[in-house]
Image: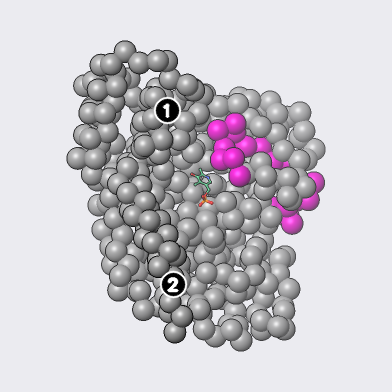
Amino acid sequence: MNTLTIAHRRRLEDYMTKAFERAKHFIGYPIATDFDYSELYPLLSLPLNNVGDPFVESTYDLNSRSIEIEVLQFFASIFKAPENNWWGYVTNGGSEGNLYGLYVARELYPEGIVYYSEATHYSVQKNIQLLGLRSIVIRTDDEGEMDYADLEQMIRLHREKPVIILANIGTTMTEAKDDLSAIRRVLKQSAIRNHYIHCDAALAGVYSALLQLEPGFDFSHGADSIAISGHKFIGSPIPCGVVLVKKNYKDRIGKAISYIGTLDTTISGSRNGHSPVFLWYAIKRLGVEGLKQRAVECLEIAGYAIEKFRSIGISAWRNPSAITVVFPAPSLSIRQKWQLATESGSSHIICMPGLKRELIDEFMEELRQEMAVPAAPALL
Ligand SMILES: *Cc1c(COP(=O)(O)O)cnc(C)c1O
């Protein structure tokens, strides 16, 4: 067997040391860190591949389709998908799920216009461009929620066109939620008959559904498709996600391909066969009650963080039932060390599963010390 040279081994060790070091100060991105999938490690020796449609067996039989379907059933249940009329797959992440939702919308309404708020994730603009769709950006309020008066005005200016809404169930910077009932009221009052609502629930979808937080956004509330990220609240060493759509829409997509012996209904060809097993394992091990408990703990930690900020004189805030805590951007060195995303002068921490109070305390202590020292103005 070939082995690494000494130099390459040292290079790998250096990299691994750095990765573990960076994992200690990771509070700015919405990624759970409390998972333990070691029981699944033997599977890493297999090239699992769920190429094509999860519901249609493939000649590539070294896959995790049967597990993937159980994962999809779990999400169909918590998102109240219409029985016998849903379809979906485990994606490479929330962005791919959003692309898929918009793709289905475009197949239904090629002339449709996509309306999405200015607080929408950066990847959506690119997806709209890829699909060659027209789009209009809607204003938000200060907390990041869509301005429905602006939406109504824009829709009325183009009322002859079908309306495709991309609703945020937790925006990237402030975890604001767009309200499907308000959106549907606008559609009704503007007498729009052809419409499609895709929910970008990448960030907050899983715990919002589990805790039945307001406003509701699932299929029973009018969603036509929903995308989530699997590596955020649930947690996974490999980025992944889930997209669900109403099946009668999706039936317009996907050809039978003899080479793989299944339907080409997904965006990418080869699909990760391991990530469905990670998601399955987390769902089965924690169960609905365990996942809910985890979400409640995140909300408590977010409340704790707000109190801590206030105790050192920093005016932090969060949206209702949000685990994202927003505060004025600190110095560049703190932002780099703690990996804090920053936009328009605000940074945030996201109280995902695995974030401990002690780490928040350590972070606050650094902030406090920095404020005590008169420093050069932060570069924003
Ligand atoms: C993370 C996120 C995305 C993108 O999801 P990925 O899993 O990173 O592809 C999209 N929208 C929102 C609101 C997100 O938080």
**Dot 1 surroundings within 10 Å: few (below 14), some, or many (20 or more)?**
some
Sequence order check, earlier mark of 1 and 2:
2
Q: Residue furthest top?
A: 374
- Left or right of 261? Residue 227 is left
Residue 7, position as x, y percentages in the image: 43, 64
Say which element carries label 2. loop
* Residue 241 visible in the picture: no
Residue drawn 61% across and 86% down? 59
Residue 160, position as x, y percentages in the image: 80, 38
Figure coloring: one colour
Residue drawn 49% across and 23% down? 380
Residue 207 covered by magenta stretch: no
Residue type for callout 2: Leu
Asked whether disc 1 touches disc 2, contact meaning CB atoms under 8 Å apart, the reply is no
Residue drawn 56% across and 40% down? 121
Q: Residue furthest front?
A: 6
Residue type for callout 1: Leu
Say which element carries label 1. helix
Residue 120, position as x, y percentages in the image: 57, 37
**Which residue matches tag 1?**
332
Q: Nearer the viewer, mark 1 or mark 2?
A: 2
* Residue 196 visible in the picture: yes
Residue situated in front as seen by the camera: 184 or 274: 274
Q: Which residues are magenta?
A: 105-123
Residue 116 covered by magenta stretch: yes
Q: Is residue 374 above or below residue 253?
A: above
**Which residue matches tag 2?**
4
